[in-house]
Amino acid sequence: MNNFNFNRFSQALKCQFMVTRKTWIRLFGIYTLVLFMANLFFTRVQGFAYSHMVEHWTMDELIRTYNQHVQQTVYFGTVFFSIVMLFFASSLFSQMKDTRSRSAYLLWPVSHLEKYVISLLHSIVLGAVLTIAAYVLADVLRVFIDWVTGRIIVWGVPKLASTISLNSAFDGWQMVWMSFAWLLYIHSLYIVGGTLFRRHQFLMTSASIVVASILLTTIVNQITWSGGDFDFITSTYDRKTQTYTQIFCPAFYIINTVVSLLVVFHYWASYKLFTRMQVINNKWLNV
């Protein structure tokens, strides 16, 4: 079957979730515990003792410093979220670990496209929702303990939202495009790795990216560019307004267009690799 039927797709999506719900619940508990322990570390272990700050510092200094401690939990949560999303991307077909489960999944009475989209939604959407929910619950537990022990109440969730929405790297549509293009490019590499490799997908994909980056950097450094250095972003300074204006060079648009096209190609290649999967494949590759 190569067609896409929405009713069949929705039923299969629900079925896939019900089959894997215990795994998602277990991951939610693990992620919540990890984030909660990280919150306690940044607010209670590192830095000055809270009792010392209350006794010797002013209230303004206490609030400012404790806000910084909570902000560190936000940074940790952001890094944790990024790593988890790459892990989920490389685990796109984790439900096909052994021959029995692989055979059952490939013989599922839905089209290849429906199977692929279901796995993609579980990997990206459900994985993101689960990780964000784990951070929110960990933040609630940390605030509850702070309230019980008589500390000031500083929430981390609003800081997470402001860190994402007000990041200075997202000024201008060009920077928004570049940021999302490169983030999706890295994610698409792990999507391809999760489809190509049969075992240890996250480690194999990470190792392949590192080796390819080293080789590519070595090759590029050996090339002598006759036109000199490439300029991606330059700036001009206006003395009257005392402000800098960014100028995006043609190389900026060319490279980011290529990266955007590669993202589409990687997702397409991942789907094509999936359509060629068999019950018995290579020991390390799904070919």
Image (cartoon, rainbow, N blue to C red):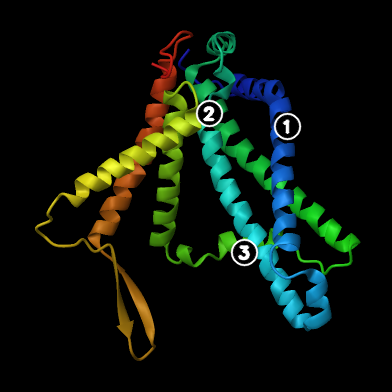
Q: CA distance from mark 1 to mark 3?
A: 29 Å
Percent x, y for residue 139? 75, 54
Circle 3: residue type:
Ser
Residue 38 disc label? none
Q: Left or right of 167: which side holds 209?
A: left
For disc 1, the neighbor class at 10 Å (few under 14, some 14 to 19, many from 20) is few
Q: Which residue is mark 3?
A: 162
- Where is residue 134 drawn, in percent x and y? 71, 45
Q: Position of residue 229 (x, y in %)?
A: 18, 62
Residue beneath disc 2: 92
Residue 72, by quadrant, is bottom right
Q: Residue at x 37, y 34 (%)?
A: 208
Closer to us: 175 or 284: 284
Quadrant of image for the C terminus: top left
User: Is the residue under label 3 in contact with that under label 1 (CB below 8 Å)?
Assistant: no
**Residue corresponding to mark 1:** 26
Place residue 261 in its image quadrant. top left
35 shown above or below 98: below
For mark 2, give the secondary structure: loop
Q: Residue furthest left?
A: 226
Camera-near label (2 vs 1) is: 1
Q: Going by the image, does 232 lie left or right of 155?
A: left
Residue 46: image quadrant is bottom right
